[in-house]
Amino acid sequence: MATHPPNYVDTRKYPGQGRPRVNPLVAAPVFIALPLLGACKKNPPENQYDWLPLEVTATAYNASEAQTDGDPLLAAWGDTLSEQTPSIAISRDLLELGLERDTRVRIRGWRDTFLVRDKMNRRFHRHIDIFMGTDVKAARKWGRRKRKIWYRIEKTDTVKRKKYEAIQNR
């Protein structure tokens, strides 16, 4: 007869019939602890971030071939854009300030928090483009506006903070 580790309970009526099951008292703490440990790493508390302000020009764009390069739903970093995920494109000079792929951005006048998912042409400076899916009428209504935005950086990220302060002091 085979021997099993101590965390197994042999509840079989006849030995050698089927597999013994795991003792729930041994397995339960493991199944409870693993998801909790994973959640801590993926979603750090909001107080670990600062929101830095920035004045930009904000326009809107749609998922149409006329307004994009090639596939209208494929962003510069390879993300697929969707109307369910509020997304923006940023001018490339904002990359120097710490706005990078999946940076969270708040825009004055909007309830949503946007994700940086796309990059704009190099000719634009201090500019964001709000993705409005297929709603051309809403994009035209938005037009071109000066807006204050806030973008999220980790409090411990001194490199991005120094870049931000250096560019703000120019």
Image (cartoon, grey):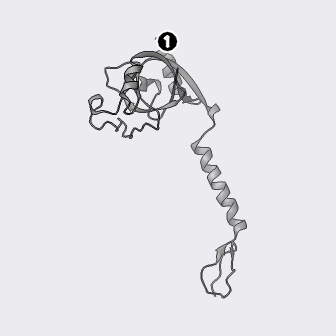
Q: At which x and y percent is residue 32?
A: 67, 56
Q: At which x and y percent is residue 63?
A: 34, 33
Q: Is residue 103 above or below residue 94?
A: below
Residue at image location 68% in from the left, 86% down from the top: 13
Q: Quadrant of the N terminus?
A: bottom right
Instruction: Give left or right: position of 98 versus 2.
Output: left
Task: Give the secondary structure at mark 1.
Answer: loop
Q: Characterize the local packing of mark 1: few (<14), some (14-19) or many (20 or more) Cα atoms within 10 angstroms.
A: few
Q: At which x and y percent is residue 93?
A: 39, 22
Looking at the image, which is closer to me, 134 or 58? Answer: 134
Q: Is residue 62 above or below residue 143?
A: below
Q: Which amino acid, mark 1? A: Asn
Looking at the image, which is closer to me, 69 or 29? Answer: 69
Residue at image location 70% in from the left, 74% down from the top: 6
Q: Is residue 40 above or below residue 166?
A: below
Mark 1 highlights which residue? 169
Q: Is residue 45 above or below residue 67?
A: below
Number of numbered discs: 1
Q: At which x and y percent is residue 120?
A: 35, 27
The quadrant in which residue 101 appears is top left
